[in-house]
Image: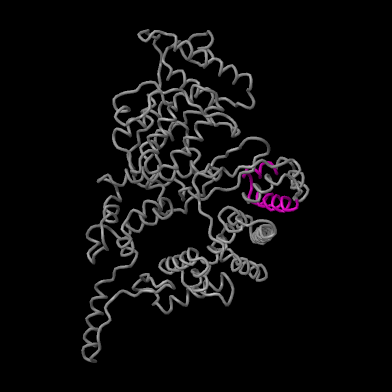
Amino acid sequence: MSETFPWSALGIAPTSDRAAIRKAYAAAVKAMDIDAEVEGYARLRSARDQALALAREAPSNAVSPPVLRDLPEDDEDAVPEDEAASTSSSGFWPLAAPRLLRPLGEGSVRTAPQVPEPAPGRPCFETIFPDAPADTPIAATLELGPHQSLAAPTLSGYGEIEAALGLIPGQTACERLEAVLTESEDPELAEAERIVAVRALQAAIGEARSEGIDRQEQVEDWLADLLATHWPRSAPLLETATQAFGWHEEWHRFDARPAVRFIGARLRGARFRARVEDPGHRYHAAWRELNRKGPAGPFRWLRASRDDVQFVLSGLRANFAHLEDELDPRRVASWNRPVIWPRVVLGLCWLALLANLLGLSWPFGTPGYELPDGSRIELAEDGPGPTLFGEYIENAVAESLGRGHDLAWLWDRDAELARRIVAQVRASLDSGDGAEGATRAAVNLVRAATHAKGHTLRAEAREAAMRLRLDQLRAAREMAPATCLALLHDGQLPEQASAFPEPLRARERAAAARLAETPLPVEDPGEEDTSVPIPGTLIDAIIARTGLPDAAVREALQNEGEDAPRCDVAIALLAAALDWEGDPATREAILRAL
């Protein structure tokens, strides 16, 4: 390779291929510690700018010296064939809600995902449907202020397709992409629109890579919000954008940006669908059966195994709820009910004969439970009847909101939460958890909902809600550090954890009943990231409260290290923030993240 600048800094031979220059720059940035090598990074950026300038000045028919090139970037979209279940994959698909990231200054610190190991010998949905591997084309980016411009370079070319769609000549790449996605109500892009959108996206990505790293992040954030907001119309663009910006390394982290997490769930769902629709896939028959219309018949087992169907359904509910919404609910409900038709038929015959002998009419129909609004939900044939199911529901509501409150009372104030409790109790009973498990699941559901509602309050009501949160974390810490972290990140106590002391439970019930008329906040995939800077004053307060050294506190604020110090630091941060009289905006951001 050449030993002259800029080629020696980029590590490639002289070339007029801009893609090769950008790829070499991205690889060099990835291998560099930007914070530690400030001068080296500045020299690398200067080399990239000079190389791109030389490439632009080179004639179009110039022949570059022979160089060893990587595979084209288009090859990054190739998805490997699905393999049989692996035995070394993680036990969960990491799609949980965002967790608190606590950087110690300006900017953002992002860490690798922490995924529990699977139980030995237990089937794992992720090992059956692994994510497609992909390389990271650029390094991590920096956070920018909202005052900076997002003007994009002009997209060259105005072909027949653009003219047919009525697009304006001279639009920037970002303007043209936004126009294609927003100017139609159709849920999918037409072929001509797709071609224009792909061109505009590739142009925007290419120009972003040729600019500084701060410019890259600015365009990246804008594209992520645009694609998430206009899904499913933006579906054909998600793979290209993800590979270009390396979102596949972020979307399953606890500190992932909401838009990136939203895109990740949809893209991983599309990859899952593409694999399972292959006729040779292990679960293709189960997937095809679930996509049929109407309830499943009594001979459903001839088309697909019940175990396979339940495995796919459980994976969809845990990872791709939007895909389950596309299925016929009657088909899903019928597969959730166990089929014991030989015994059922025999029993019906005996009962019909007995009813005929006694002169009784046979009450044909599926058992159901009537909700306060007059609608009915189906119950499992081998589960509790409507009367017993109603008792389980009332017990769960009373345990969650206190005695004297029933389902009808809650339905009048928060019908959405009431529906969720009914669905949770039914799901727990169908899975064999029993009445106690159903009640525990309902309490966890109401606890998480109460905490979410607390973030919508103001003044003294907000302070009371956060002090209840502080006492909950302290009680969970006394059980175990892992229990504390589960409550902090998921809003729920693990199944094996004991219940809170009765005085604290009474406060929880009172808070849930008091906030019954407060609507649940709507989740917005485009809302801001939860990363917040922690002032030095609060850092000192945390050290004083926990007795931990400065390094351990900083490690815990980045969600690293052992469970115990991470939990202790979170509790100390919340307590210090509640007593802090500093900047209201920073205090509010910390409380919202906790």
Q: Assess whether residue 255 is covered by the magenta stretch.
A: no
Using the rendered view, name the quadrant where residue 325 is placed.
bottom left
Q: Quick check: can you spot residue 430? A: yes
Residue 577 is a magenta residue = yes
Visual colour scheme: one colour
The residue nearer to you, when weighing 184 against 64, is 184
Q: Point out the residue furthest to the bottom here.
A: 358
In this rendering, position of residue 303 left or right of residue 564:
left
Q: Where's residue 443, x and y in %?
A: 55, 66
Hey, which quadrant is residue 375 in on the image? bottom left
**Where, by quadrant of the figure, is residue 373 drawn?**
bottom left
Percent coordinates x, y for residue 339 in the rendering: 29, 68
**Residue 548 percent coordinates (x, y):** 74, 46
Q: Is residue 61 above or below residue 492?
A: above
The residue at the point 28 percent across, 71 percent down is 340
> Residue 276: percent from the left, percent from the top?
31, 47
Classify residue 381 as left or right of residue 542: left
The magenta-colored residue range is 553-579
Q: Nearer the viewer, residue 235 or 48?
A: 235
Q: Is residue 55 above or below residue 363?
A: above
Between 530 and 497, the one lying in front of the other is: 530
**Is residue 478 something one can see in this rendering?**
no
Vertical relation: 137 (above or below) 579: above
Eyeballing the image, is 398 above or below 91? below
In the rendered picture of this protein, how many numbered marks are placed on residues? Answer: 0
The residue lying at 50 percent from left, 21 percent from top is: 25
Instruction: Give the dominant element type of the magenta stretch: helix, strand or loop.
Output: helix
Quick one: 100 or 191, which is closer to the camera? 191
Q: Residue furthest right?
A: 544
